[in-house]
Image: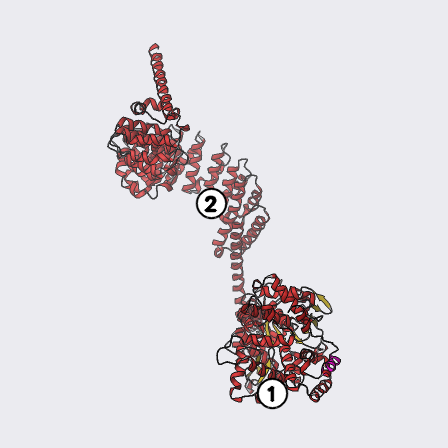
Amino acid sequence: MSKIKKNIHLHILGIYLFSIGLYLTNINHVRGEISDSIIQKYGENIDKIEDYKLSKFNLENTTSENIHEVVEKLTSTNPKVRAGAANILNSVDSKSVIPALIKALQDENAQVRSNAALSLGEIEKNNPSPSIVTALSEALKDENVTVRYSAAHSLGKIATGYEGYKKIYGAIPALIQTLQDKNAKVRSKAAFALNKLEIIDRQELVNEQAEAIAKQIPVFTQALVNKDAQVRLSAAIALALLKDKAASSVQSLVKILQDNNPKVRLSAAIALGNIGDKAAVEPLLAVLEDKNSQVRSSAAKALGNIGDKAAVEPLLAALEDKDSQVRSSAAEALGLIEDKAAVKQLIKALKDEEEKVRASAAQALGLIKDKAAVKPLTKALEDEESMVRLIANIALGRMGKTAASAVPEIILTLKDTDRFVRSSAGTALSSISKDYRNQAEKLSNQELEIGITTLETALKALEAIKEKFEDEQESLKADLTALKKEKDSRLTSRILEWMVKHPWFAGTFIYLIFFPLFWSSLLLIRPLWLLKLNQKLQPLSNLQLPEALGGWTISIPSIIFLQPFSYHPRVLDAWVATNIKAASDNFSQKKTVSNRAEHISLPVVVDKKTVANFSGNDLKACFDKKLTNILIHAEGGSGKTSLACQLAKWGMSDDINIRPCKHRMLPILIEQELDIETQGNQAFIQEITGQLQVLIGESEVIPTKLVENLLRQRRILVIIDHFSEMSEATRKQIRPASGNFPANALIVTSRLEESLDNVPKTTLKPLRVSGNQLSSFMEAYLTQRGKRDLFDDAEYFDACRRLSLMVGKRNITALFAKLYAEQMIAKVTVDSDDFVDDLPLTIPDLMLGYLNELNRDNADGELDNRTVQKDAKIIAWECLKKTFRPGSRKLDDVVAVLDNQDSVNSRLHHLEKRLRIIQISEPGRDKIRFALDPLAEYLAALYLIDNYGQDNDKWIEFINATKSVNDLEAIKGFLLAVQDCCASNAEDVPDSVVAALSELTGVVLQVNRESLIASGF
């Protein structure tokens, strides 16, 4: 006893001496030095260092430089120093030392390699690294037994750590190979590492390694008789992993069923079960009597895996074993064998005192699927243990439709306190549902009805639960649909039998019911097919029957009830949706539309109510009516056409919050006279048909019937522009009150407040730009054009003040303001410093300046400004002189009055294509008109001044002619233009002219040319 105490004291003294050494080492650390002599002791006294736990070395508080110094000692010429450094580093919690230690595994000194292996195993705990496992796996092949031992020891440490089985996955083949090592301790350490992995329960880890492991079967078989129990255990486990590939080892495994070590016997039983060879049945039956309960349990499971019915009776006896785990395993095994002879005993086991036995019995009954087990399993849903309730649900689910009677009780467990039980209830209902679906064709009509009712009940219950069962619900819905489809098919079969017996009744039924239902279905899923089919059948819409059959004219589309569906609103909406993109693009490219791309919102009077920020929403009430008639009336240049174009764009929008109408509409813009002479009463519909074809880019003529339905159901928005300037013949075609007038969505722009046949209509009147709005309007327009940054604030407000002085107290139309803005842009581009001085002083100057600016970039040899102005004035007057309103004139008549006939065509081309101030009608190109009405009026007025001058008689004749017009309001725009031009050029006309014109217009104009000059302009 005193000797033992003496040894203990000596051991403590040794540790104390090491403590002093550690302390001195720390002092050296502080001084920036690490003594080789101290480190060497750590290499020489490895066992004591391990006892002392190197954390006492206190490297936690050292700097990275100090650690680096220790790492550098791994390259010392003294092997003992290297060994000590390798040993010390196992206390360093840093990844930075890993590469150096891995390199040390290749050191020439075995002690260095061994210490490095041990340190890597220690460091890996907090610094997981695949490179460590790989390096240690290679070290298992080291020539030195101590190194191999250390590597196996470290791999065992890693295996016991958190998720060690994942970390050490790659080392499994090397560890198995090490089971053949000559040294018993090394073999034992390798076996220990493998056993710690519990790989027998982690089959997925070795699937990829199976081929490599299979080559070692002879080694494993030989290892089964190794003296070391750990080695025998590992060999049995490895063979278990290989399953039937290890069939050659069955007899060797049978022998070790009698091994002294119970763990070895247990693993041998599992291996035999996994291999599945029936030669093992008898030996395993004997093991059911083993004194160790875990071994008996493993034997029972193995017999279940083999599945031989010879094991049923012994397993039934095992259900009475005193150990609950054995009873549980026996129940599981009986379930795997699936012999109905076990049902009675398993039902009895549902009342076992142990939870796991009851659960295993329920599981087994679910696998056997005997109807007699349904009620006991249903009763088990009330078990006090959640695991039993969960397994009972799963078992009933496996039984499929056989367990249909248990559905109400399964539904109750959807509200179980345990979430896993609730989840299993959903799974069970889904499984029963799936079984019904799989056997649908074999079910009797009564069983089919029960199945449908059962599934409907289950689905309703799942939908009522707050917990999410989306997958189960979708599965039940699909299965229920399949059952109903099966039921319907059987009903269809009975109907077909009846139809064969009663063909006339069947034919009548099909005729009256089938076609409308079929077209209704197509209307929901493929509406355009109805339209296309109707068009294909059009040749059959006027069939003349032979005289023998009565000589009647019949229409196949009408007979099959297709006609009413072909132009249903859903069909027309689908047709519009197909063509809306092309229509929107092409509409935006129209000259009239593109010239008004920059739309500035101005106050609009809507049915005598002023709306400051007008939008499509202000017309929703109008478009909710079956007949939509909108009149936009105001003087020339007020933005009527711009507003109409904007309404058209809103009507095509995908956003219902922008659209004035619930559905989208295709816009048709009519701004030329209708071809009444050649098309007669069909001129209106033919014009729309032609424009629609171009608008959507269709190569074939659009059927008139389709166009009429699009018009009547307001899928086409017709815009009649310049209505007040159109001929009487064209105006007579626009009769909204006529029953034959097809357009139920109509917008008319006019200078007059038209009656439009006195139909209910919404009137819009764009207001002029008032003096106090000029600046904000110009700001908005220039910003939208992206040109506002061309002007600094001083220049901008000088230009606006010049415009304000030019118009005086008058409010001006949006067009004049836009033209002035374009002049600002043009002038500042040429002369950014003094551009304000170059801006026009009067509105007539503004018009001429606009023309000059359009013609500014003409190439050499093209028309000069003087020629352009002269031709434009003549054409303007020719377009106004008959009615004093801008309109169309025959091209030949205009050409006849122009000078220099040889170049007329090229000059007209220049005005039309380059300057775009005139439009020649398509496709006949026989009529001409001005693109902008106010421009035409001012140019015509300037023409009169140029030609009448001081000739008082001509002016009197002109004034008398205007007085003879019945509606002076209709020509007021032109009269104001003449008055403005005369006032601006007072020295060129008789004094009496301005006064006479003032009497006609009721407006007294004062030209502010002097005011502009006096103001510094």
Relative to the observer, which residue lies in front, 112 or 846? 846
Res 431 visible: yes
Type of amino acid under label 2: Lys
Relative to the observer, which residue lies in front, 802 or 522? 802
Tell me the residue that label 2 is attached to: 369
Q: Position of residue 812 (x, y in %)?
A: 68, 71
CB contact under 8 Å: marks 1 and 2: no
Magenta-colored segment: predominant secondary structure: helix
206 in magenta: no
Q: Is residue 87 left or right of residue 514?
A: left
- Looking at the image, is 770 positioned above or below residue 290? below
Res 239 visible: no
Q: Residues within 10 Å of mark 2 (few under 14, many from 20)?
A: many
Q: Position of residue 185 (x, y in %)?
A: 29, 28
Q: Position of residue 682 (x, y in %)?
A: 61, 83
Please report the bounds of the magenta region as a residue range.
993-1001
Type of amino acid under label 1: Glu
- Looking at the image, is 505 positioned above or below residue 64? below
